Amino acid sequence: MEIAGPTELLAYRLVGRELTSTATLVEVRGRRVGDGFFGLIAGPCTVETREQTLETARAVAEAGATILRGGAFKPRTSPYAFQGLGLKGLEILAEAREETGLPIVTELLDPRDVEAVAEVADVIQIGARNMQNFNLLAEVGRLPKPVLLKRAPSATIEELLMAAEYVAKEGNARVMLCERGIKTFERATRYTLDLSAVPVLKRETHLPVIVDPSHAAGRSDLVLPLARAAVAAGADGVMIEVHPQPEDALCDGPQQIRIGDFARFADEVTKIVALMGKTVG
Ligand code: PEP
Ligand code: MN
């Protein structure tokens, strides 16, 4: 990346490669992401019910997912849309972990929920809408939990790196970056997956780079080809939305893969992971 000057050069000194050349390996409950290990993160967009979450968790665990995703606190564009089950959703996620053994990644929206979310989450997700919520970033920077930081749809790669620096600066160096699509003029997809961000980030930072093709595409039929491309571009993991009945989902139905289709998805992705010389963690 073109570096503007000495100030810019130091703008992400902790997450940049200048001072730390070795790749960061994030380990949670024995699952690994980064430094040759690939994270297969899957689960529902939103924790809707106990049954829907447990059914999905079982299916993705069976198919080889390494981390379970699911939102209890949901950032919705409309204030009238389902906002998530909140604390009840966290309880359901804890039960899903108990049953499957998979570590949980779930979103923290509000600093007031930090204790409740940190109690259950193995990895704290900071969503795209909060990428530059600097107080929230500092808050998770003080937690002893890895953070999955999503790129805002209108943020540059450099802004993403500086957002990660806010977390690292507080002492938490276990940050995973996530490309999830950016806003462009294109309307065939929900966002445009910025695949270039993967090799650029891999060059600029030692942190693991995850790709979320579900939110980028907004269409389940594009999730596998985009995931394959992400792995081939050098991603350290993918994050995928999966649902038992996507047509009935309370959030992001069109982009969620049906649970019965996830095993094939995982097999196809794993082939490219092996070609890239990596191991599903
Ligand atoms: C999510 O992954 O649950 C989510 C809300 O995605 P994003 O923040 O990328 O929109
Ligand atoms: Mn979603």
Image (cartoon, grey):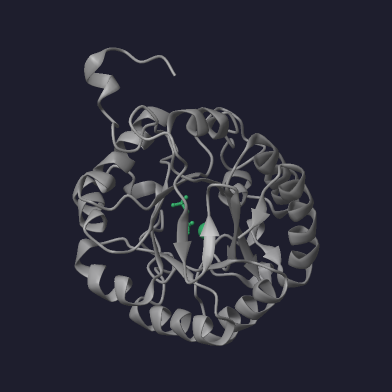
| Residue 156 visible in the snapshot | no
Q: What count of labels does the image hold?
A: 0
Where residue 54 appears, as percent x and y from the top left, is: 58, 83
Q: Nearer the viewer, residue 228 or 194?
A: 228
Q: Quadrant of residue 114?
A: bottom left
Q: Quadrant of residue 61?
A: bottom right
Q: What's the residue at 60%, 77% (across, down)?
A: 57
From this view, report whether residue 131 is shown above or below residue 67: above
* Placement of the N terminus among the 4 image quadrants: top left
Where residue 94 appears, as percent x and y from the top left, is: 44, 82
* Placement of the C terminus among the 4 image quadrants: bottom right
Q: What's the residue at 77%, 44% (across, down)?
A: 275
From this view, report whether residue 110 is shown above or below residue 19: below
Where residue 162 appears, as percent x and y from the top left, is: 30, 35
Q: Nearer the viewer, residue 61 or 37?
A: 37
Q: Nearer the viewer, residue 19 or 259?
A: 19
Q: What's the residue at 59%, 81% (across, down)?
A: 52
| Residue 37 visible in the snapshot | yes
Left or right for 192, reference 201: right
Where residue 105 appears, as percent x and y from the top left, is: 45, 65
Left or right for 106, reference 139: right
Q: What's the residue at 56%, 27% (across, down)?
A: 185
